[in-house]
Image (spheres, rainbow, N blue to C red):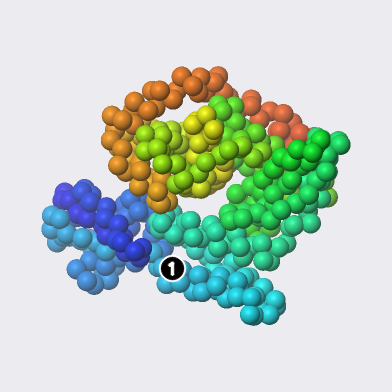
């Protein structure tokens, strides 16, 4: 056994995975799997160099590696990232004709799909914020589902608020299709943010109709969980009556929500970040960047948006260890920077103070979305179960 470093290149600064125990007699295939475990890059997309040369495809590729030496790694689709950004810029160029801009957006979406499918953003987490903003813009430019959104929102909110006036505003940012619904009752306007489920509106789904439309119980459960403990917004799960295949998440605007990066109180920032990190470990939620987490007017944590990736187990096994010793908050700007500066003792103190306020966690079960599941069954709608299965209207599953 020896100890090595894996250097991941491609971002503005290299990421070093130091102190990696490895057997220098490790087989080539096992080494690639070990690298995947550490860096999240699957073997088919690993480009590994050892001592300046491409890693040899031999039975024992690092037999003579010495203590402290490096393997230099990059994702094989790294060179596709820059062209993707250029396509996005071309699609946003108002000097170009609509047809040309649409074609650029479609090509960008195709590039994004390739990157997303390859696990690129699991490895290069610092690119995620830019990707989410740009792919959202590209999808809105193509704009395939806006009519369905507006029809669904009008029917859903008119039924909920019979004497209301419904209007719409454009959604800003985000990787998923969505709109902002303004509901005006008795002269008072309330905003609701309506979007697709994560895998229903991602770039992947535009080409894969079979994945596009199944509502995800993991995401549904996470939203309801956060609402019940007072951390998430009021949430609803409408669906489009014109099709059994289109489903949405609608969240109520959090009044006086203050984004994390606009908060000047350092103590409050630390509290919010640690609490959000704990919930991300419990629920497996991602994209908790400084725009999606913040404080209410009572200075309590508020998480207004996130996604549940399909690469995580919903229930994490080493929550306490990760909470104390790791800072893998998605690598997304200020939130991750703040977390990295907080020691394990302060983290544990913040958590101990938070848990009594989240007392409902003890009694929460999957029953919290039973009404929604029953509604889906009644309408003959398939949905993705928490363990990855698919339920059908007759109660069977696959």
Q: In this view, does 173 lie to the left or right of 192?
A: left
Is 77 in front, or is 104? Answer: 104
The correct choice, above or below, for 46 with respect to 284 in the image is: below
Q: Is residue 334 left or right of residue 255?
A: left
The residue pinned by badge 1 equals 77
Is 247 in front, or is 147? Answer: 147
Report the residue at 24% width, 72% height from top.
53
Residue 319, quarter of the rendered image: top left
The correct choice, above or below, for 156 with respect to 196 in the image is: above
Report the residue at 52% width, 41% height from top.
258
Q: Where is residue 212 in the image (x, y as percent from the top left)?
A: 66, 53
Q: Position of residue 67 (x, y in %)?
A: 13, 55
Report the residue at 81% width, 35% height from top.
186
The correct choice, above or below, for 106 with respect to 95 in the image is: above
Q: In this view, does 16 lie to the left or right of 295?
A: left
Q: Is residue 126 in sight in this rendering?
A: yes
Question: Hey, which residue is sitting farthest right in the picture?
Answer: 163
Please rate how many residues cluster around mark 1, counting C-alpha atoms within 10 Å: few if below 14, some from 14 to 19, many from 20: some
Q: Is residue 68 left or right of residue 330?
A: left
Q: Where is residue 362 in the image (x, y as percent from the top left)?
A: 51, 20
Is 328 in front, or is 365? Answer: 328
For the C terminus, the image quarter is top right
């Amino acid at each position: 056994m020896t100890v090595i470093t894996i250097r991941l290149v491609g971002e503005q600064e290299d990421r070093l995975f130091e102190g990696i125990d490895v057997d220098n007699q490790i087989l080539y295939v096992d080494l690639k799997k070990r690298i995947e475990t550490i860096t999240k890059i699957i073997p088919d997309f690993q480009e590994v160099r050892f001592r300046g040369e491409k890693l040899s495809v031999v039975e024992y590729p690092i037999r003579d590696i010495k203590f402290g030496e490096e393997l230099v790694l990059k994702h094989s689709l790294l060179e596709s990232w820059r062209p993707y950004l250029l396509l996005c810029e071309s699609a946003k160029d108002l000097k170009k004709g609509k047809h040309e801009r649409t074609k650029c957006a479609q090509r960008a979406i195709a590039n994004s799909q390739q990157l997303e499918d390859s696990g690129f953003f699991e490895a290069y987490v610092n690119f995620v914020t830019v990707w989410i903003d740009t792919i959202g813009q590209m999808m809105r430019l193509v704009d395939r589902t806006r009519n369905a959104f507006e029809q669904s929102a009008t029917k859903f909110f008119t039924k909920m608020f019979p004497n209301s006036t419904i209007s719409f505003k454009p959604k800003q940012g985000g990787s998923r299709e969505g709109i902002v619904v303004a509901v005006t009752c008795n002269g008072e306007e309330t905003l609701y943010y309506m979007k697709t489920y994560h895998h229903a509106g991602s770039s992947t789904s535009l080409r894969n109709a079979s994945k596009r439309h199944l509502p995800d119980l993991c995401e549904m459960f996470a939203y309801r969980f956060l609402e019940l403990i007072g951390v998430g917004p009021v949430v609803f799960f409408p669906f489009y009556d014109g099709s059994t295949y289109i489903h949405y998440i609608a969240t109520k605007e959090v009044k006086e929500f203050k984004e994390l990066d606009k908060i000047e109180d350092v103590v409050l920032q630390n509290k919010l970040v640690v609490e959000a990190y704990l919930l991300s470990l419990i629920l497996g939620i991602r994209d908790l960047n400084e725009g999606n987490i913040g404080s209410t007017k009572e200075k309590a944590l508020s998480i207004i948006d996130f996604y549940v990736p399909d690469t995580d187990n919903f229930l994490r096994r080493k929550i306490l260890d990760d909470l104390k010793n790791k800072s893998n908050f998605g690598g997304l700007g200020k939130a991750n920077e703040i977390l990295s500066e907080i020691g394990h003792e302060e983290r544990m103190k913040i958590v101990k103070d938070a848990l009594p306020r989240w007392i409902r966690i003890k009694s929460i079960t999957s029953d919290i979305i039973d009404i929604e599941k029953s509604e889906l069954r009644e309408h003959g709608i398939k949905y993705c179960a928490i363990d990855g299965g698919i339920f059908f209207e007759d109660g069977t599953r696959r």
